[in-house]
Every structure is written in structure tokens, then in C-alpha cells.
């Protein structure tokens, strides 16, 4: 529960914008955004772990989880989408798109995880592809920036929990007390999972958008 209030601070748009810059060959800008996002994650992790340490509590690297129903997932996603968009000062006229499409994306992710049995990275990839396919033409027709409505629809899928658990594991390893193979394995697994999810989200959100933009621009060119 202590992690939940911190997840809203995870700089998901910076990670995704950085990936978009790298794909568009804006190497310096993309690298700067990714480094900035990483520094924010480090700062959040230090603050969270410091607060837990002062209270004599540690963040487990492998906390128990539970399955949730589709309606719980979708409703929670709607609340999270609304909160994120308020946090990012999204204009009211744009709010229905990221909230509605974000709820649909979470439902699709739930189906991939629960019904098909795939992992969280695959679920995030499928959800982000769907968001890109829906919102790319919407952003063109309504003149709303895709970065705003597209990224806001998926930012709640950013792996903040995995990042915080990895940071907790690294802190326990650095302290040198009770370092076990299970701790090392869980810490490495959390970090790798977070990286794969971020890459899957970036690929799923950006590549379909660039593909649709390419074909749309070709169709819009006057024939000679």
C-alpha cells in the first residue's frame, strides 16, 4: 500500500517521449529525457525507502499478488486515468479520450493476462498497440496532440512497482545483510521486467503511430 501513492509520480511520459525521440533520431534529446526520467525514479525510490526505513518497514521484492476481475480492473483503470489526466492538467475537452480508451486498453490487457495467460509485458504491448491504432486517427481528425491523449491512456501501465521493488532489493544488497540468491534473483527479475515493459509500451505505442502517419502522408500527397 505504501507504494501506491508514489506510482503517480513515476515519469511515464518522459520514458515514452524519450523512446519516441530516439526512434526519430533525436538522440541527444531522447537520451536527456531518459536520464531525467531515471533520476526522478531514483529520487522517488530514495524517498520511499527512506520513509519505510524510518518506520522499520522494508519493501518485499516479491510481494504476494491476487487476481482481479475484469470489472474491478476497468473501473480502477478509469479512476487512475482520470487522476493521471488531472495531474497532467489535461483540458476537459480531451479528457474522455484517454479515460475511455485507457479503460478499453486495460480490459484488453486483462484479457491477455487472464484469459490467454501471457505475461505483463505482452499485455502492455497489446494494449499500447490498440491505443495507438485508435488514437492516431483521432488525434489527426480532432487536432489533439497524440502525445497528450495517447500517453495519458497508457501511463498507468508504467512498471513503477517493479522499479521500486528493484530499488529496495538493491538497497538490501548494498547493506550486505542477509544477501541470498533469492534476493539477487528477485531484484534482477524486477529490473529486467520493468525494462521489458517500458520497451514493449514504447514499441507498441510508437511504431503503429509512425506506420499510420507514414501511410496517411503518402495517401495525402498529390499524384503527379
Image (spheres, helix red, strand yellow):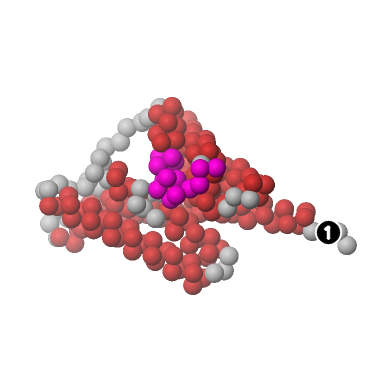
Q: Is residue 82 above or below residue 185?
A: above
Q: Residue at x 77, y 55 (%)?
A: 220
Rendered view: 23 above or below 134: below
Q: Residue 155 lies in magenta, yes or no?
A: no
Q: Position of residue 12 (x, y in %)?
A: 42, 53
- Quadrant in which the C terminus is drawn: bottom right
Query: Could you tell me if residue 189 is visible in this image?
Result: no
Residue at (12, 48) in percent of width and height:
55
Quarter assignment of residue 70? top left
Question: Where residue 222 sits: x, y (%)?
Answer: 83, 59
Which residue appears at 43% of the width and 50% of the height?
88
Q: Is residue 170 above or below residue 98?
A: below
Q: Is residue 110 left or right of residue 146?
A: left
Residue sitting nearer the eye, 115 or 146: 146
Q: Quadrant of residue 72?
A: top left
Residue found farthest to the front: 92
Which residue corresponds to mark 1?
A: 222
Tally the numbered discs.
1
Q: In the rendered structure, which segment of residues is drawn in magenta? A: 80-93
Q: Residue 100 location, x and y as percent?
A: 52, 36
* Disc 1 element: loop
Q: Is residue 85 magenta?
A: yes
Name the residue rendered at 35%, 48% in the picture. Answer: 8
Rendered-image quadrant of the N terminus: top left
Q: Is residue 21 above or below residue 206?
A: below
Residue count near mark 1 (Cα–Cα under 10 Å), binned few <14, some 14–19, many ≥20:
few
Q: As rendered, which of 143 and 20 lies closer to the eye?
A: 143
Measured as percent of width and height from the top left, residue 18 is found at 48, 62
Amino acid at each position: 500500500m505504501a507504494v501506491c501513492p508514489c506510482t503517480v509520480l513515476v515519469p511515464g511520459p518522459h520514458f515514452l517521449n524519450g523512446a519516441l525521440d530516439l526512434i526519430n533520431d533525436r538522440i541527444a534529446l531522447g537520451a536527456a529525457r531518459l536520464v531525467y526520467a531515471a533520476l526522478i525514479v531514483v529520487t522517488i525510490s530514495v524517498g520511499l525507502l527512506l520513509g519505510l526505513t524510518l518506520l522499520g518497514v522494508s519493501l518485499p521484492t516479491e510481494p504476494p499478488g491476487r487476481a482481479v476481475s475484469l470489472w474491478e480492473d476497468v473501473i480502477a483503470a478509469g479512476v487512475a486515468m482520470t487522476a493521471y489526466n488531472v495531474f497532467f492538467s489535461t483540458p476537459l475537452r480531451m479528457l474522455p479520450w484517454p479515460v475511455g480508451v485507457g479503460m478499453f486498453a486495460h480490459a484488453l490487457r486483462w484479457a491477455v493476462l487472464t484469459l490467454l495467460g501471457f505475461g505483463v509485458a505482452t499485455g502492455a504491448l497489446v494494449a499500447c498497440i490498440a491505443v495507438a491504432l485508435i488514437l492516431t486517427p483521432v488525434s489527426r481528425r480532432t487536432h489533439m496532440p497524440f502525445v497528450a491523449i495517447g500517453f495519458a491512456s497508457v501511463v498507468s501501465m508504467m512498471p513503477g512497482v517493479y522499479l521500486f521493488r528493484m530499488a529496495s532489493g538493491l538497497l538490501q544488497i548494498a547493506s550486505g545483510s542477509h544477501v541470498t540468491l533469492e534476493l539477487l534473483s528477485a531484484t534482477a527479475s524486477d529490473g529486467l521486467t520493468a525494462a521489458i515493459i517500458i520497451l514493449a509500451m514504447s514499441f507498441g505505442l510508437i511504431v503503429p503511430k509512425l506506420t499510420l502517419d507514414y501511410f496517411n502522408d503518402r495517401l495525402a500527397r498529390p499524384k503527379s
